[in-house]
Amino acid sequence: MRGTSFFRRNGAAARGIVAGLLGVWALSCHAGTLAADATLWFSQGRPTAEARQAADILAAAAADGLEPRDYDAGDLRRALGQAADGPPLAPEAVNLLDDRLTAAMEHYLADLHGGRVDPRKIHENFAAAPDGQFNPPAYLRAAVAGHDLPEAVRRAAPSFPLYGTLRGALARYRALAGHAAWQAPLPPLPGRKLVSGQAYAGVPALTQRLIALGDLPVGTPAPERYEGAMVDGVKAFQARHGLDADGEIGAGTFAQLNAPVAGRVRQIELTLERLRWTPLLEGPRMIVVNVPEFVLRAYEVHDAHVQVKAEMKVIVGKALDTRTPLFKEDMRFIEFSPYWNVPPSIARAETVPRLRRDPGYFERQGFEFVGGDGKAVTTLSAASLDAVLRGQLRIRQRPGPMNALGDIKFIFPNNDNIYLHHTPSPGLFTRGRRDLSHGCIRVEEPVALASFVLQDTPGWTEARIREAMERGQSSTLRLQQPLPVVLAYGTAIVKADGRVYFFPDIYGLDKVLDEALRQRSASRRTFASAQMHPQLSY
């Protein structure tokens, strides 16, 4: 079975390796193995320094959130160690172990560079990078030939800065798993919520936990009551976990404070996985919306350094029924003082019933009917409402203070008809959880976003942008250069302050990804076991 000694003596070594290597084909669906007379990892029957480096790299795959068992890291490390210390291997045994290590490394490099699952199968519509951009077999052989394997592996990982900072955060949170602060759950709250000045039996444990997380300075003494610096520490914790930072410990904050460290580790691992396929560095300028964070960032890349030029709150699609899809498209137009064409689904389910109950709503909202010929009808009638339900007319909202899109719309054509826009209800941005829309994304600071988009377009000053937004007459501007927009999903990030922030899995996509990865690993190991023990597969 796997994990037993392969090299007690040379003949047994050959037989053991042959048996163990029957499972290699589970790892090498896309891997090209070397010819029998051209080994990559051996010299005169002994593993090379690069072979030992490769074994160490596979054993350390967890540092990137990958699973060492997916690459037979333990067995390979033992086999190579015994091959180095025992009698020289026969040529057949060398070739088999060489092929096995090659296949494992190619698979590891492919996973590290581009991820382990097809994002389109888990509700994330990001296309895989063209095969020609990264060729694991060729990349691996060049790295070994150049005696550059560790550095080549580092270069194969995503280069976006967030990946590196999250990788460091993963190590820190793994170290917390055995910390004394998590040996027992916090005691129950004394009431519905804990506020400043109250007594609480869990103050010492909570102090210890906040210090370990970095939300309180090292050496902060535990107060007799919940007060002072401890309240500030809880506010810092709340800010890092998508909670209202009011310093009061209610059910939501208490649940987050008691969350197992293993769950945080898994959030980081899943976000690292997403960063392998999310297209975040495909141009010098880009707009990225992180849906569960409810935040938009516009950034530029200069000399491989990412500079955030604008950051703002957003409102995204409702988790229950109108989720914002995840994809990348190019922004091509800005529409000032836009019309809002009410989507047919919203018109049928919401607008028409509302107009039947409250006819005055038609005029207050600035609605009109539009036919296939483009002519507008500005009076309400039952016949027109019936025509909307039959698909013969559509409802449109004119530019103005009540327009659902506000006074600007950022268009990146896509199959889901999703776009960025302002809103006549800016008060909604004060809410902590902001999944409130029908799918499109409302932006808090449209002028700042327009200034970023148009910064290289002559004549488009902030004053001109505001004038176009306030004119009340619809006009469309075509961008001189398309600007990539990415709608992404990450429930763990490291911000500029170096602290780790976690956000609720509002769409349940972490659960979907977690299950997909677990099924993939289980399937791979089951197939490998069946190949090693073919009698079990009958």
Image: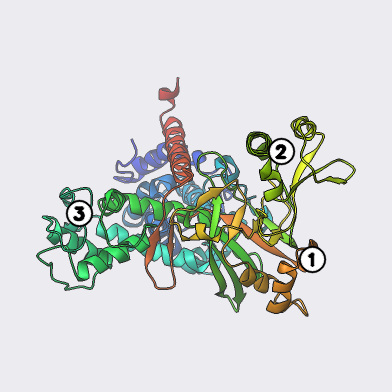
SS of the residue under disc 3:
helix
At 34% from the left edge and 62% from the top edge, which residue is drawn? 245
In this picture, is 279 found above or below 304? above
Q: Which of the two labelled residues, at mark 1 and mark 3, occupies the earlier sequence position?
A: 3
The Cα atoms of the two marked residues, 3 and 2, are separated by 52 Å
Q: The residue under label 2 is which amino acid type? A: Pro
Q: Where does label 1 land, which residue?
A: 477
Q: Taking the image as drawn, is residue 40 in sight?
A: no
State the residue in front, 362 or 369.
Answer: 362
At 44% from the left edge and 51% from the top edge, which residue is drawn? 270
Q: Closer to the observer: label 3 or label 2?
A: 2
Q: Taking the image as drawn, is residue 423 in sight?
A: yes
For residue 182, the mark is 3
Q: Closer to the observer: label 1 or label 2?
A: 2
Crowdedness near tag 1: few (<14), some (14–19) or many (≥20) residues, C-alpha within 10 Å? few
Q: Are marks 1 and 3 in contact (CB under 8 Å)?
A: no
State the residue in front, 431 or 239.
Answer: 431
How many tags in the picture?
3
The Cα atoms of the two marked residues, 1 and 2, are separated by 26 Å
Q: The residue under label 3 is which amino acid type? A: Trp
Q: Residue furthest right?
A: 373
Task: Point out residue 71 in the picture as x, y percentages from the top left corner.
Answer: 44, 47
SS of the residue under disc 2:
helix
State the residue in front, 342 or 455.
Answer: 342
Q: Where does label 2 land, which residue?
A: 344
Q: Residue furthest front?
A: 360
Q: The residue under label 1 is which amino acid type? A: Leu
